[in-house]
Amino acid sequence: MTTAPSADPGPHDPPDYRQVQASAEFAELRRAHRSFAFPLTAAFVLWYLGYVLLSSYAGGFMATKVAGHLNVALVLGTAQFATTFLIAWWYSRHAATRLDARAEALKARLEAPTAVPRAAVPHPGTPEEGPEPTGVQEAGA
């Protein structure tokens, strides 16, 4: 039984991940990610813990009516959901504008095959080899 040819053009060495990790290109990508993600994560955790602490220890404040039957607790609780979606959107925008192009360039450099002579790479179906056997008999054969 034969398998479909792979898209891989030939043998190549695996990337040296330690060398990539030590590269300036990777360090800049990591810095761009961390300088956005870490402060934003810390701010959101503080915001969430503030809400929990207010709910636990400031019941009178959280029960304060804002409008009609809406109180501070409901407004802040809804704001938790809103900020979650806002942060997700903001991060995806940040990643698309500042991280993705750098990551793709680094990935392309890592996945670039080593130079292999054209003659060393076999091409299935060439006249020298003939058609690839499929294991299926043709009708009338």
Image (cartoon, helix red, strand yellow):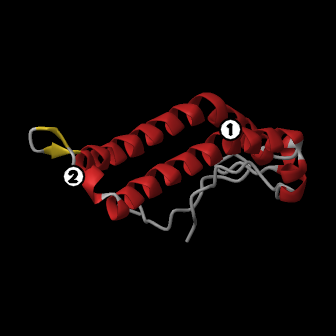
Between residues 32 and 125, which one lies in front from this camera angle?
32
> Tag 2's secondary structure?
loop
Mark carried by residue 63: 2
Q: Residue at x 33, y 43 (%)?
A: 79
Please, is residue 91 above or below residue 111 in the view? Answer: above
- Residue at far top of view: 97
Residue 23 point in image, percent of width and height: 89, 45
The residue wearing badge 1 is 104
Residue type, numbered disc 2: Ala
Between residues 104 and 41, which one lies in front from this camera angle?
41
Q: CA distance from mark 1 to mark 2?
A: 50 Å
**Does residue 103 appear left or right of residue 42 in this picture?**
right
Figure label count = 2
The mark that comes first in sequence, 1 or 2, is 2
Q: Residues within 10 Å of mark 2 (few under 14, many from 20)?
A: some
Residue 89 point in image, percent of width and height: 44, 36
Residue 27 point in image, percent of width and height: 82, 44
Please, is residue 57 above or below residue 43 in the view? Answer: below
Residue type, numbered disc 1: Glu
Between residues 90 and 60, which one lies in front from this camera angle?
60
> Tag 1's secondary structure?
helix
> Does residue 13 appear anywhere in the picture?
no
**Does residue 23 appear left or right of residue 54 in this picture?**
right
Q: Residue at x 88, y 40 (%)?
A: 24
Residue 11 point in image, percent of width and height: 81, 56
Q: Residue at x 40, y 41 (%)?
A: 83
**Does residue 63 appear left or right of residue 21 in this picture?**
left
